[in-house]
Image: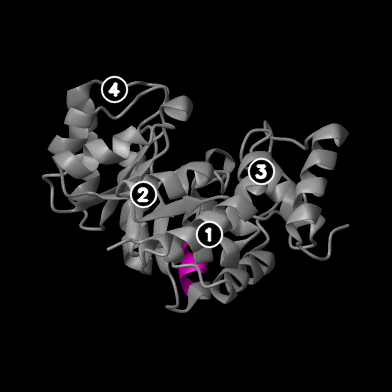
Amino acid sequence: MFTGVYTALVTPFNTAGNVDYDTLQQLVESQIAGHVDGLVPVGTTGESPTLEFDEHKKVIERVVEFSKGHLKIIAGTGGNSTAEAVELTQHAKEVGAHGTLQITPYYNKPSREGLIQHFRTVAEIGLPVVLYNIPGRTGRELSLDLVVELAQDPNIVAIKEAAGDVDRVSQYVQACDLTVLSGDDALTLPMMVVGSVGVISVVSNIAPQEVTDMVHHALKGRWEQAQRSHAQLYRLFTDLFIETNPVPVKAALAMVGKIEEIYRLPLCEMGREKKAVLKEAITDFGIKGIS
């Protein structure tokens, strides 16, 4: 159901600190022009922890509207409260999203049974669920046996794997029928070699066509071309994570004039030295219009 490149879309803010929906539309249109397969609004890259509830819903609604049916939308509607995740997911279904990205509930560190009940409750809504394993952010890993059990639910269809372990992809492929998407740009190609079918990408915010080319080469078995694309992108894969995501990617988008560089605390701008590293990486990659 979900293969290819899904951009973990940033949420642009204006100088007043509000969501800039005009710029959001421009970002969506640039992603369509870059031939990505879909978008993931209001994930971690979209600064979901600092968006107000109504903003969270509106961003998803507008991204669906702006995509005009050209892209699949996997809405970031997770949370550490099941009731909140259910409300956001129900809304995403109503406005036309194609799936929901469900992060492991964070901070409260639920038990195994609590996780099962949480994800199954969300799955009952009927919107296809993409599990999200990122223990570095949540403090709670989705164990292999838990994922295998959840995969028995027909509405749980995929997993975004972001624990930094390529071997987990092989384990998933051997143990269940879930679609596996990389959650780490730098590991996308290695993961595809062993069975992943795409990526939920941060880097495609700034290089949508190039990331799409790499992934689609791999999907079609053109491994030499995919390796060349990976090598071309590798510095972006590393330098766009020199500080907590999404700070570097928003800085990069601001450098090329696509957004205002505005965050909501506790996120804030990088220092001058890291910005210089990032600017050099973008310049070397060949992206034009840098200021």
Q: Which mark is residue 59?
A: 1
How many C-alpha atoms fall within 10 Å of the one at disc 3: few (<14), some, or many (≥20)?
A: many
* Image position, residue 72 (x, y; %): 39, 68
First along the sequence among labels 1 and 3: 1
Under mark 1, the amino acid is Val
**Is residue 195 highlighted in magenta?**
no
- Between residue 61 and residue 201, name the one nearer to us: 201
| Front position among marks 3 and 4 | 3
Residue bearing mark 4: 110
Element class at badge 4: loop
Q: Do the residues under discs 4 and 1 have CB atoms within 8 angstroms?
A: no
| Front position among marks 2 and 3 | 2
Residue bearing mark 2: 193
Q: Quadrant of the C terminus?
A: bottom right
Part of the protein shown in magenta: 58-65
First along the sequence among labels 2 and 3: 2
First along the sequence among labels 2 and 4: 4
- Secondary structure mostly taken by the magenta-highlighted segment of the chain: helix
Q: CA distance from mark 1 to mark 3?
A: 24 Å
How many C-alpha atoms fall within 10 Å of the one at disc 4: few (<14), some, or many (≥20)?
A: some
Element class at badge 3: loop
How many C-alpha atoms fall within 10 Å of the one at disc 1: few (<14), some, or many (≥20)?
A: many
| Front position among marks 2 and 4 | 2
Q: Do the residues under discs 1 and 2 have CB atoms within 8 angstroms?
A: no
- Furthest residue to the front? 224
Q: Do the residues under discs 2 and 3 have CB atoms within 8 angstroms?
A: no
